Amino acid sequence: MHISGDGPFSRRCETVLEELLAVPRVLLTTSCTHALEMAALLLDIGQGDEVIGPSFTFVSSFNAFVLRGATPVFADIRPDTLNLDPASVERRLTPKTRAIVAVHYAGVACDMDAIGGIAAARGIPVVEDNAHGLFGAWRGRPLGTFGTLATLSFHETKNVTCGEGGALVVNDSSLTERAEILREKGTDRSKFFRGEVDRYSWRDLGSSYVLSDILAAFLYAQLEKRDAIQRQRRARWQAYRDALGPWAAASGVALP
């Protein structure tokens, strides 16, 4: 029985996510944090580079890039969404800016039109930290499909979970082969398993970012029940909104 990484359940999960998001490649990882570390490696972030992200986020959004020697640049957030303010991002751009990290906080989408426009005009890649936003959308398009790369979380605090886990969404197909190598400890073992090489060897930097197939099996069951899980979550959200609505209206607080 295959219980280590890249087993049958891992591939089933990756295929489901690729089809739902309509993206070239999804790679399961041991955490969203590790998926972000892979993104930093794939973008060749290094000493002296600057990475812009929100001032309100989880530490992993920046740690992944700081580990590569980059300087974090904190942009302001919008009070209505708690997400990146595109105007603040633009003010913080310098010749050293190498990436913009867009965090869809609490499942609320960033303004990807504005952020994407700023990035495209300067040739700067966007990394979507979509830990909170799986199955969310911006103007009808799934979150996690806008950036060069995106990351997902399957931590126990997320709607769809396997306890600890994540995924890297590769929207730029030119990065797929290297992503597989980085994820497999810097080796081309994925090619070996597919019968494309007669033996695998060390090719690049990397680490052990592959999720156990035991956890992937748990995750696959969650993905099969995704619609029911989302309905339950929405019902709970609606109950809180209905209960807090009168207080919010009396206090002048705008609820989403």
Image (spheres, rainbow, N blue to C red):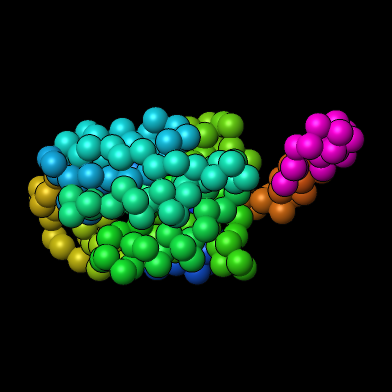
Residue at (30% x, 59% y) in the render: 125
Q: Quadrant of residue 185?
A: top left
- The prevailing secondary structure element of the residues shown in magenta is helix
**Quadrant housing residue 29:** top left
Residue 80 seen in the figure: yes
Q: Position of residue 121 (x, y in %)?
A: 31, 69
Residue found 61% across the figure and 67% down from its top = 139
Residue 249 within the segment the image draws in magenta: yes
Question: As displayed, is residue 180 above or below residue 236?
Answer: below
Q: Quick one: quadrant of the N terminus?
A: top left
Residue located at (60% from left, 46% from top)? 81
Q: How many marks?
A: 0
* Image coordinates for residue 179, horizontal then vertical, percent: 26, 55
190 left or right of 130 in image:
left
| Percent of width and height locating residue 221 | 62, 46
In the image, residue 109 above or below residue 2 = below
Q: Image check: 225 left or right of 238? A: left
- Of residue 228 and residue 101, the one placed in the foreground of this image is 101
Q: Residue at x 67, y 51 (%)?
A: 226
Q: Is residue 251 left or right of residue 149?
A: right
- The magenta stretch spans which residues? 238-256
- Provide residue 106's location: percent of width, then percent of height: 59, 41
Residue 117 part of the magenta-drawn span: no
Apparent side of residue 248 relative to residue 187 in the rendered image (left or right):
right
Tell me if I can see residue 11 in this picture.
Answer: no
